[in-house]
Image (spheres, rainbow, N blue to C red):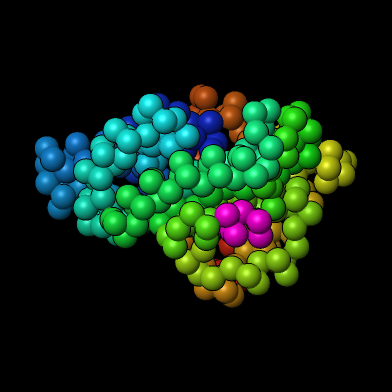
Amino acid sequence: MYNLLIPGCIGIHDINLADSIKLAREAGFEGVSFDIFEAQEYADANGVDALKELFGEIIPGVWNHGVDWQNDEKRDAQIERLKGVLDLANELDSLNVTTGIMPANNDRPYDEQYEFLSTRLKPLADALAEGNVRIGIEFITPKTLRDKFTYQFIYKMTDMLDFAKHVGGNVGVLFDVWHHYCAHGTVADLDVLTPQDVQLIHTNDAPLGLEIDEQQDLSRTLPLETSVIPAVEMLRKLADIGVDVGVAAEPFSAALNEIAASDPLQAAKITQAANEKLFVATGLRG
């Protein structure tokens, strides 16, 4: 596992490839997420070796596949565009992407939604599989969000893993410690996972003073800030299973976003330190 910077997770937006790599390096991260289409443009203009030199010691982490896979009008053309960058993904050894599925909706009951989503995600999964790329689905959980909709859908990690396997052999999960906590998930639940099932890990913590079912999406804290979530135990279990992917803090912190607006490097350093503290507590650092 490695400490991964996803700039958007800490309120840093509209940052180009070179600047995001520089930010990750200066803040002490081991890897960074990136726009693979921008990376392809850079490689086309300067060569793949130059692109690798740009990353240097920074690991090319997860990247945005750019496919609105639920959109029947756009999906096929976007998948064709995606196929053009899969060779580069393999050159960079960056073979993990993610997506997310809402835990409820107003349009379709469970079985209809299951069919609707699985048939639309499969073409993307199949295209990625041809390029040796795996995709992880983020299971989104809070009851306060689910209760806003008419029809409930998957929100637990174990159920999302079953859905993923139904879609394709290269499909797994994005594991977010906050979402697993909000689903009343346990550390023991993780025993069903294999190293290939997890494509990305999100770390964070939950605000104090709220019951699990009172937690609000987009209101979280930095890892280990409150110790409400047993993130140490979760991450240790994933490491013991053999999961070896990027670990990105996603705190949804208004205070951190405010810092990021004026001093992105300081916000990145704060985030890196919080995630590193979690790594140490987990035993991933000596």
Span colored in magenta: 158-163
- At horizontal 44% and vertical 53% (from top left) the residue drawn is 135
- At horizontal 51% and vertical 24% (from top left) the residue drawn is 262
Write down the quadrant of residue 258 in the picture.
top right
Write down the quadrant of residue 175 in the picture.
bottom right
Q: Is residue 235 magenta?
A: no
Q: Is residue 127 visible?
A: yes
**252 or 70, which lies in front?**
70
Q: Is residue 160 magenta?
A: yes
**28 or 239, which lies in front?**
239
Residue 187 position, x and y percent, is 72, 66
In the visual, does 10 lie left or right of 223? left
Residue 18 position, x and y percent, is 29, 38
Q: How many marks?
A: 0
Q: Is residue 203 visible?
A: no
In the visual, does 199 lie left or right of 259? left
- At horizontal 59% and vertical 75% (from top left) the residue drawn is 240
Q: Relative to residue 154, is residue 235 depicted above or below?
A: below
Q: Relative to residue 270, is residue 95 depicted above or below?
A: below
